[in-house]
Amino acid sequence: MQGNILLVEDDLEIARIIRDMLIRNDYKVTWATTGLEGWEDFQSATYDLVLVDVMLPEMDGLSLCKNIRLKSDIPMIIISARKADEDKVKGLGLGADDYIAKPFSMLELKARVESHLRRWRRYQGIPEKANQTSYRHGLMVDWDEQQIFLHSRRVTLTGKEFDLLAILAQHPERTFSKHELYEHVWKRVETDEVHTVTVHIKSLRKKLHDSVKTPRYIQTVWGKGYRFIGE
């Protein structure tokens, strides 16, 4: 497990998206929908990081941050639709470590969570964990070393194959067209070269023992492109 996170967010749709992203990345998540519920959850368990919305019923997010900071030094990230500088200054002044304004990408939030946890663990003298993600059906990706393992056995990929897997796996809810994948991975816009993506996806699937008819990792969305389903 990467860490235990307290998420305090009353917007159900946003909270579910954040929670699902964190769970996919091997975090344990406790979700509270009010400030008071979040405060009670915080006092009843041990957490590594707190994500707090500002506009909350029963107890607003800034008051919750103030209460938490009086008891603990763990990282706190405010997530809010408010973009005014005074709100950011007030939140950071009450002890929050970061402030991210809605809307934001899950990739950005994931990066900020990982960054604050790394700093917190260094401060605590806790050895840093490898930057790895485990997926269903035995797939594990080591992002720092750019290596993948299938049932604990290393699978050798080319650089482009790894980049294709990475862009798909890091955005599992999104379908990428061949043109988009070509632009992301090859860094060029060539409408006549998208067959290159097809060739590399075929090779990647072969190495992952991933069937087109019954995919475990990469699904073809007919007429649209590909998406990652190996969460």
Image: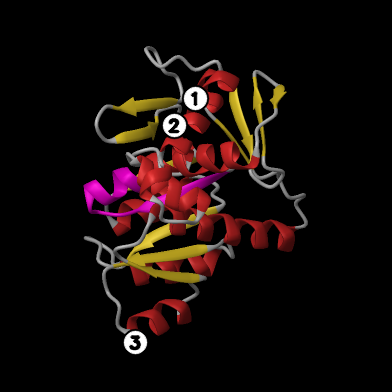
Amino acid at the residue labelled 1: Lys
Viewport quadrant of the C terminus: top left
Q: Please state which of the two labelled residues, at mark 2 or mark 3, is closer to the viewer.
A: 2
In the rendered view, would you say 165 is above or below 56? Answer: above
Say which residue label 1 marks: 202
- x, y percent for residue 188: 47, 56
Residue located at (52% from left, 32% from top)? 200
Q: Residue 130's quadrant in the figure?
A: top right
Residue at screen point 27% across, 51% down: 14
The circle drawn on residue 189 is none
- Residue at image mark 3: 86
Q: Which stretch appears magenta? A: 3-18
Residue 13 belongs to magenta span? yes
The disc labelled 2 sits on which kind of residue?
Thr
Please rate how many residues cluster around mark 2, counting C-alpha atoms within 10 Å: few if below 14, some from 14 to 19, many from 20.
Answer: some
**Residue 37 left/right relative to 121:** left
Is 38 located above or below residue 213 in the figure? below
Identify the residue under disc 2.
198
Estimate the spatial distance between the alpha carbons at disc 2 and disc 1, rounded to whole Å.
6 Å
